[in-house]
Amino acid sequence: MRIPDITPGARVLAFGHYQPSTIVTNDDLAKNMDTNDEWIQSRVGIKERRVAGPAESLEDMATQAGGKALAASGLSAEDIDLVIVATCTLESQIPNAAAVVAHRLGIDSPGAFDVNAACAGFCYALATASAAVRGGAARHVLVIGAEKLSQWVEWTDRSTAVIFADGAGAAVVGPSDEPRIGPVVWGSAGDKSEAIAIADRDSFLRQEGQTVFRWATTALHPVAKEACERAGVDPSELTAFVPHQANLRIIEAIARKLGADQAVIARDIVHAGNTSAASIPLAISRMIERGEVRSGGLALLLGFGAGLTYAGQVIEIP
Ligand code: UT7
């Protein structure tokens, strides 16, 4: 027996993203529920979010984001041999989104599977892609985070409707002479699994906001520090910190405790809302597009959410 094509490292070649065109402001939401712009901005940090219409599916958004990442990578569909979609809001239980999206992008017979680790899903999928490339199971992997949370949120429930939104982000992962995706630190706290749930196909998303808020602001900065440590990077060397866009107060609390003073902190939530597994690739792709971070710099990604699950890793920005 032999294992072919072992490569010493993996890297992100490019990111891409897609957002639906409909913008929902806080004032729009206040027309249907007892909330207001001042509360949402001060407690969550969101000014507006994007929501897909009934005709726009999760697979549509994932295909758009994946196609953009593929184009930006300079590769073509035939170079991709594995597609992973991180999502927790797919309408159909089967088929998975990955096979559908791969087919739409003209990727011929790739490995294709979905990952459900909720808002941590993209970091889980990226770690899996990196391991697949390094282990010789795939040469190039398309990793997509895509969510249509709008179809699982009750639009009169102010505890969830003001937070969640729709969108997709994607990355192309390929081989590298040296590691440019650091070791993942991942884990879960299943004792708190009831804190965020969609109980069954007839239910809406419910969350115990304060339970999750307390956990996120106390348990995650050690994970962020460990991801840096395992990559051999001091937080002061980070060009960017891109945590899951859950709540601006959570983002700022973790950033403060991490001490990444030089890093640009992703605050995409202000205009994109909380898009669960899509939020990290969406945020970093938009930061790159706006020229806020330099190619070759180091970014710490940190996903966390329902499960409760978490995962983080340092990557080199493409
Ligand atoms: O992405 C998945 C992971 N999820 C998260 O990370 C979510 C973590 N949790 C949070 O982000 C926050 O807990 C929320 C944004 C969900 C809620 O913010 P909070 O500061 O924890 O508010 P709260 O639930 O403690 O409510 C404070 C007050 C209450 O009023 P009283 O009892 O103090 O009079 C609520 O009834 O704010 C009220 N309230 C609202 N008022 C206006 C709750 N929601 C709203 C609202 N608009 N939308």
Image (cartoon, rainbow, N blue to C red):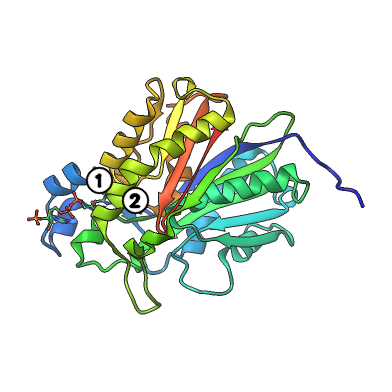
Q: Against 146, is 268 above or below?
A: above
Which class describes the residues within 10 Å of circle 1: few (<14), some (14-19), or many (20+)? Answer: many
Residue 231 at least partly seen: yes
Q: Against 293, is 202 above or below?
A: below
Q: Against 27, is 8 above or below?
A: above
Q: Nearer the viewer, residue 95 or 248?
A: 248
Q: Which residue is mark 1?
A: 46
- Residue drawn 32% across the image and 29% down it: 256
- Residue drawn 39% across the image and 27% down it: 264
Residue lying furthest right in this view? 1
Residue lying furthest bottom in this view? 202
- Residue drawn 31% across the image and 56% down it: 164
Residue 19 at least partly seen: no
Which amino acid type is shown beneath numbered disc 2? Answer: Asn
Label 1 CB less than 8 angstroms from ligand 1: no
Q: Residue 193 in the image: x percent, y percent?
A: 39, 63
Which of the numbered marks, if any, corresponds to residue 14? none
Q: Are marks 1 and 2 in contact (CB under 8 Å)?
A: yes
- Judged from the image, the secondary structure of the residue bearing numbered disc 1 is loop
Q: Residue 263 in the image: x percent, y percent?
A: 41, 24
Label 2 CB less than 8 angstroms from ligand 1: yes
Task: Name which quarter of the figure residue 318 lies in.
Answer: top right
- Residue drawn 45% across the image and 41% down it: 302
Left or right of residue 284: residue 31: left
- Judged from the image, the secondary structure of the residue bearing numbered disc 2 is loop
Q: Which residue is mark 2?
A: 274
Question: Label 1, label 2: how many angstroms apart (C-alpha)?
Answer: 9 Å
N-terminal label among 1 and 2: 1
Left or right of residue 66: residue 303: left
Q: Residue 293 in the image: x percent, y percent?
A: 46, 26
